[in-house]
Image: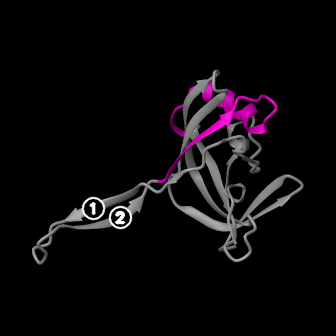
Amino acid sequence: MKLTRNLFVPMLDVDVLKESPTETAEYVPIDLSTIFEFAFNPNTETYSYICYANDTTETTGYAPTMEQEIVLDNSNPLFKVLYPFCMSMPTGSKCTVPCLLVEPDMSTGKPTRGRLWKDATISPGTVNTVDGKLTFTLNFNGDQQQGTVANSDGTVTFTPDDE
């Protein structure tokens, strides 16, 4: 089965970005974007073992990122939260937001699988009024949790596999 772009959806928990968070996850899709490029950014270390004529490189971890954009549209739920967040020029822990990457189940093709990074950070990029875009970078920090995703009447829930 062919897996199309609409089956891979990054979502942000916008509740933590609000002035008065409720501690209940409110996942909103990064929907009005023309970019989806998840960069794995492997961390490597090179060793010069005496038993080999050439060096050996090993992957030691990852620092995944995703350059992203959202259309300047004040009726879009994500833009409504993200624009004031970016304009406040946050620093430190104020940039931390849970990010859920929804992806298709490889056996069914349905977007029912997910990877959650609880400590992702948003780095604001640019506001381009000519192109009508707000750009930002997502840095997927820490460990990811894999699980299932359900969407009921617009409310997205994530359940980790280990529960």
Q: Is residue 19 above or below residue 24?
A: above
Judged left or right of residue 10, residue 110 is right
Measure the alpha-carbon separation of dots 2 and 1: 7 Å
Amino acid type at mark 1:
Glu
Which SS class for mark 1?
A: strand
Foreground residue, 134 or 97?
A: 134
Residue 52, located in which quarter of the rendered image?
bottom left
Residue at 76% from the left image edge and 30% from the top image edge: 73
Judged left or right of residue 129, residue 65 is left
Q: Position of residue 103 (x, y in %)?
A: 67, 62
Q: Position of residue 46 (x, y in %)?
A: 23, 63
Mark 2, Cα crowd under 10 Å, few <14 / some 14-19 / many 20+, is: few
- Return the residue at label 1: 45
Foreground residue, 17 or 78?
A: 78
Q: Position of residue 39 (x, y in %)?
A: 48, 53
Residue at 82% from the left image edge and 32% from the top image edge: 75
Q: Give the extent of the magenta segment.
A: 64-93
Q: Is residue 82 above or below residue 13?
A: above
| Residue 92 is inside the magenta segment | yes
- Return the residue at label 2: 60
Judged left or right of residue 3, residue 120 is left
Whether residue 88 is visible, yes or no, is no
Q: Is residue 90 above or below residue 146?
A: above
Foreground residue, 63 or 73?
A: 73
Q: Is residue 106 above or below residue 149?
A: below
Amino acid type at mark 2:
Thr
The N terminus, quarter of image: bottom right
